[in-house]
Amino acid sequence: MGVTPLIEAEGLAIGHRGRAIATGIELRVGSGDVLAILGPNGAGKTTLFRTLMGLIPAQAGNVRLSGRDVAALSRIEIARAVALVPQSLHVPFAFTALDVVLMARTARLPAFARPSAADRDLARAALDRMGLGPLAGRPVTELSGGQRQMVLIARAIVQDTPLLVLDEPAASLDWGNRHRLMERLERLAAGGLGLILSTHEPAHAARLATRVMTLDAAGRTWTGPALVALQPERLARLYDLPLNGDTTS
Amino acid sequence: MTASLETDRNLLSRSSLSEAALFLLLGTALVAALLLGTVVGPYAIAPSEVLRLVGARLTGTAEPSTAATVLFNIRLPRVLAAALVGAALAGAGAAYQTIFRNPLVSPDILGVSAGAGFGAVLGILLSMPVIVIQLMGFAGGLATVAMVIGVAALLRGQAEVLVMVLTGIALGALASAGISVVKILADPDQQLPAITFWLLGSLAGVKPGDLTLAVLPVVAGLVPLIALAWRIGVMAMGEDEARALGVETGRLRLLVILCATLVTATAVAISGIIGWIGLMVPHMARFLVGARFDRLLPASLILGATFLVLVDTTARSVATMEVPLGVLTALIGAPVFVWLLARGRREWA
């Protein structure tokens, strides 16, 4: 393509303390690309995300954000390049939804500053767009799992990075919110953002993804177009189901 | 844009009060408490007299009088020490709670106070000068918090909140045992009474010189916490999230622990072990201004100062003999702790 991808992994091995759980991972996401990652529980999707974000070191190979090795970047540089939407929001204190979203501005603030009125406006606008405007002042400890998830997505958008990494963003959402989330993510990708998301719903991958990566329990990866990845035989093998079973429901 | 805030718990966003107005109110309460503390005592000084004497001292037109002697040599140092210690313990508590993501930690529960106490008591036993006692207190506090974090890291994956609190209690007990040994070794006429009274927490012995010695380390510890308050607050989101948001958590955590421990140990060195403030005051502050650390820290500092000035004033005026401060704070703190347990049990694993 000639354009430097937003994120690129080569010969990547992921794992903890010298024990690799998956090796030889190749991955490339550019502006407007959506990479969906499918795989059974425990296959290492979250470990992969943590490695991509530079939160844990790669066991082999490397990850480059816009051409620069993630291991050599500061946390602020990484936070300006890629935003993370974790699986869930757990915080022991009653931060308001607005407070949580405002934290996305941290990487843009001078070291000793606190968010400005302009930052507040950005955060409020993002909450409004996620349909959470009326809950901005509500402590997140009082919100439902789905609402917290939407707060995390609003935060990632306010972080204003070219790339979003979403760890099972739809897991705790009801049907209506899943629909809204998919629409929102489609629009973000259409607007030029790169997205990497893990999901347990092949239908989501089919709808959003330009590419699908599968990561099976043995640590083998495969990357290809969504249509091929989501063939029933492939899904059956990935999730270790009998071939004659109805695997696409 | 006009969000409904009806269920919001903290006072700041529930009322129409602005942040500045709320802090002005808190500041006024502190000034009122300071004034009350200087007025109350066996030698009565009227509030107007206090203001006049302070004004005269500041403009350099002071004339010697009994009131001036009582005010500047006895009462003001004591009241200011109470404010300093209260602010220090509450600020350190707010910082520890935020970076450990744990509403139940505080300098005393993490064992920092007992560790600092052991260091300082050892200093008293060895008849060291005040500055060395402070340094030994700091070393004791830092060693304890390092061990608590070390054990929690070793047992990673288990309920971290519980591990940290229990380790803190265990190490606190160990430090208390060390203190008991020091008490046995101490000279029963000179050192032992001083150690015993000091362990229960007291500001009775504070001299103007001690205050000057303590101000510098407390300010040195608090300034980085205030300057970096926003980033420190992000650490409440947890290690991975804070780093993903752009915070170098390793370095920042170390800095916060050093600062909070310096502040705690300095407070312990001048006032002895005063429990509960570091746990309780940050919760009172959260109730007023919410969880954001850039608001929580200044609110905790002001509230902590106000609280301890009032408690100390009570301690020296309710009875003919002085009530140890630790007794009074425990009387207020224990019920608050139980209330926290009852209210927060869903939120911690």
Image (tube, rainbow, N blue to C red):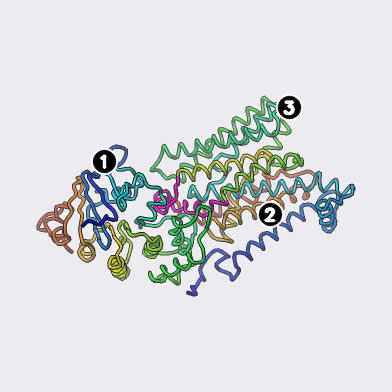
Q: Which residue is mark 2?
A: B306
**In this view of the protein, can residue A4 be seen by the observer?**
yes
Amino acid under disc 2:
Thr
Classify residue B182 by image quadrant.
Answer: top right
Give percent across and percent down for residue A235: 16, 56
Chain ID at mark 3: B
Please report, as a chain letter, where disc 2 is located: B
Query: Please, is residue A240 above or below residue B146 in the view?
Result: below
Residue wearing tag 1: A60
Q: Residue furthest bottom?
A: B2
Gap between marks 2 and 1 measured at Cα = 56 Å
Rendering coords of residue B256 (x, y %):
53, 45
Please tell me whether mark 3 sits on a helix, a strand or a loop: loop
**Label 2: element kind:** helix
The CA span between labels 1 and 3 is 65 Å
Give, as a three-letter code, the residue at label 3.
Pro
Residue range (magenta): B226-249
Determine whether, in the image, residue B58 is placed left or right of residue B278. right
The amino acid at mark 1 is Ala
Answer whether residue A46 is visible to the viewer in this image. Answer: no
* Residue drawn at 43 percent across, 50 percent down: B238
Residue closer to the observer: B58 or B242: B58
Is residue B326 rendered magenta in the image?
A: no
